[in-house]
Amino acid sequence: MAKLVGKRINIGLSFDLDERLNKISQMYGMSKSALCVYFIGQGVTSIEAAYNRVQSIDIKDVESIINSASSVSFGDFCKKLESEKS
């Protein structure tokens, strides 16, 4: 068995999920723990990438998206929203 590197965590699983992980880990030829680490790593990477994309959006990007999606300008769109609030 490989030497543990990093931090160990314990999680509870439903019996169904445990069986499914067993099947997949056998298909991949890896332990269930290694498979879970792989899945967690993929999930964390995806969430960070999405968060970074959202953080990098500028108001000009939003204006461009709205203007390209409709014939209404961003300014008119904001005015319409304000009038609907009143």
Image (spheres, rainbow, N blue to C red):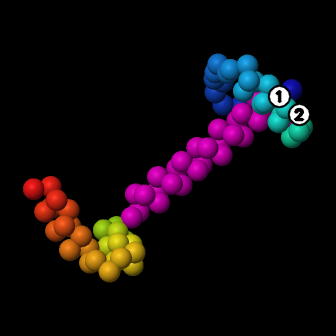
Residue 36 % position (x, y)? 72, 33
Badges 2 and 1: C-beta atoms under 8 Å apart? yes
* SS assignment at label 1: helix
Part of the protein shown in magenta: 30-57
Residue 5 % position (x, y)? 71, 31
Q: Camera-side residue: 80 or 12?
A: 80
Q: Crowdedness of circle 2 by 10 Å Cα count: few (<14), some, many (20+)?
A: few
* SS assignment at label 2: helix
Look at the image and tell me in which quarter the N terminus lies.
top right
Relative to residue 37, is residue 43 drawn left or right?
left
Q: Camera-side residue: 55 or 79?
A: 79
Q: Camera-side residue: 65 or 4?
A: 65
The residue singled out by tag 1 in the image is 22
- Residue at 64% from the left image edge and 27% from the top image edge: 7
Look at the image and tell me in which quarter the C terminus lies.
bottom left
Magenta-colored stretch includes residue 36: yes
Relative to residue 60, is residue 32 drawn left or right?
right
Q: Crowdedness of circle 1 by 10 Å Cα count: few (<14), some, many (20+)?
A: some
Q: Is residue 60 visible?
A: no
Inter-mark Cα distance, 2 to 1? 6 Å
- The numbered disc on residue 26 is 2
Q: Is residue 11 above or below residue 67?
A: above
- Residue at 51% from the left image edge and 54% from the top image edge: 50
Magenta-colored stretch includes residue 40: yes
